[in-house]
Image (cartoon, rainbow, N blue to C red):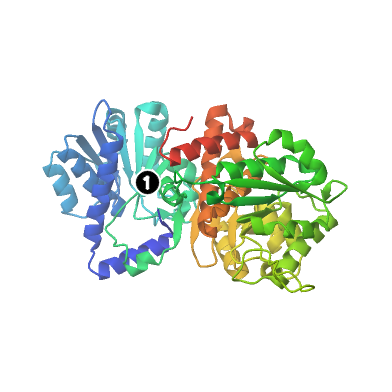
Amino acid sequence: MKLVSVAEMQAIERAADAAGLTYAQMMENAGQGLGEVVAKAYAQLPARKALGLVGSGNNGGDTLVALAYLLERGWQASAYLARPRPPGDPLIERFTSRGGKLYDLEADPELEGLSRLVEGHPLLLDGVLGTGIRLPLHQAVARVLERVRDLAGQLGEALHVVAVDCPSGVDCESGAAAPETIPAEMTVTMAAVKAGLLKLPAFQLAGEICVVSIGLADDFEPWAKIQRLVMEKDWVAERLPSRPLDAHKGTFGTALIVAGCVNYSGAALLAGKAAYLSGAGLVTLAVPRPLQSVLAGHFAEATWLPLPEDQGVIAGKGADLLLSHVHKATALLIGPGFGLEETTRQFISRVLQTASERKRPEKRYLDTGSAPGAPRRIELPPLVMDADGLKLLAQLPNWPGLLPANTVLTPHPGEMGVLTSLSPAEIQSDRLALAERCALQWGHVVVLKGAFSVIAAPDGRTALVPVASAALARAGTGDVLAGLIAGLRAQRLEAFDAAAMGAWIHAQAGLRAARRVGSEAAVLAGDILDGVVEVMGELAGREGK
């Protein structure tokens, strides 16, 4: 699903109309798609009766087309004109000619008729207002929506609300919403998801979001230029590496995870297990030497690279040992649970400086064939930088230039503040634009974590994860995400795909963990790992257990 601003969608529609796909045909396509979605989703209603709240704009037209579609398939349908339609509207004529019943706000000043209609129809299509609204709402419209919202609250599960393009009263740019907005069970949006639907509070009012076509061709230039997408299951499933029957562990790569200190020993464990669950063939944990004996009994599947330590943290002199092993890895993760000690900053500096000074683009391994006494040529494998590793990285001069191309950076807003010197308010005010700007400026893939995580690549591609859940607001969940991304990179997925897929799997795992545990407040990072198992099973076409 593509993600657009309101202005972008309006510009695309204007260009399509000028190119021969008329507004009338786009409305017809949208309404037919809406009707198809509704007919399929609510086929099991005891009474197939739909009421449309119809406005004066395109959303009202889409609703009338959908109601006519339902009438042709045996449904009963009524339309309530909450705003005037043009005289002689052919959409109304078609609707009534197929047996639809028409009602009008002007003949219902006390809204008693509206109340009876809502109570008598199990399905409501909310097509009053569209994407171009400005808040606050006009009093007459607000009064209609408020009455229906109150009735919907009273009727509960007896009334199913489907929003047409967006819930009426939602600002599809900012995500703000009028207090009269009717919460939807489902929002059927046209052509692309509007950016405001994936902001709060709009997201909570939209319910399940699905997209229907308005007839735009894939190669229509203004449409093809949109590179922002909303993550969905099919996109992820299509990109998962195949699992051939004759595979061996080397087929699926090696993730080398450099993590942990005495204060945050669990970070390495969580990241390592997540890397395995993503499908990596081998996971090696490079940890401060004292942690290896503590963690090994909890992670039999891992191999280990104990690193020199200084009072429980990775010491700077451990860089040479790590660099002597990186040729064995197909992905490298640095940072979870590091702590912020100076000796660990020196470790990161030495690893990156040495590789930056001695790398050769055509090789991905330690060159042992150099002449005696010559410096060894080293290039790091695909890199993921996370957590405290990012904070230490930010202290290095020209740090973006030290990283291998298309390194994946996974900051939460606090870490993004360290990398950018921006305040939390500045970061959260426009997360999408900030992630895109930083990805372009730094030349690396940015995963800006949080509600609606944003993944941005330097080539302009952007993905947004349509999940906001307090289940993920817990220590250790970021380590799971970093491990997932590193595991997917180890399987030789390109950086943007691995980052976006990992973020989507992680978010879905959080939702499943909350359902299984029964409370978002009670979810631990280890529960997210169990959720990953379920999600991976579903992606493979099996029931998650």
Give the image location of residue 15, x and y in percent.
31, 69
> x, y percentage for residue 112?
30, 32
Q: In which quadrant of the rendered view does residue 318 lie?
A: bottom right
Q: What is the number of callouts on the image?
A: 1
Is 342 on the left-hand or right-hand side of 278? right
Residue situated in front as seen by the camera: 254 or 245: 245
Residue that sits furthest to the right in the current view: 311
Q: Residue furthest top?
A: 46
Amino acid on which disc 1 is placed: Cys
Please identify the quarter of the rendering in which residue 433 is found: bottom right
| 430, 373: nearer the viewer | 373
In the rendered image, is residue 292 in sight? yes
Q: Left of 288 or right of it: where is 187?
A: left
Mark 1 crowdedness (10 Å alpha carbons): few <14, some 14-19, many ≥20: some
Identify the residue at image location x=27%, y=52%: 30
Residue 408: x percent and y percent? 61, 58
Relative to residue 343, is residue 539 drawn left or right? left
Q: Position of residue 395 (x, y in %)?
A: 77, 63
Q: Secondary structure at mark 1?
A: strand
Q: Is residue 385 visible?
A: no
Q: Eyeballing the image, is 405 above or below 313?
A: below
Q: Quadrant of residue 75?
A: top left
Q: Is residue 193 left or right of residue 302?
A: left
Nearer the observer, 286 or 470: 286
Q: Name the residue tied to disc 1.
A: 210
Q: Residue at x 55, y 44 (%)?
A: 278
Q: Furthest residue to the left?
A: 97
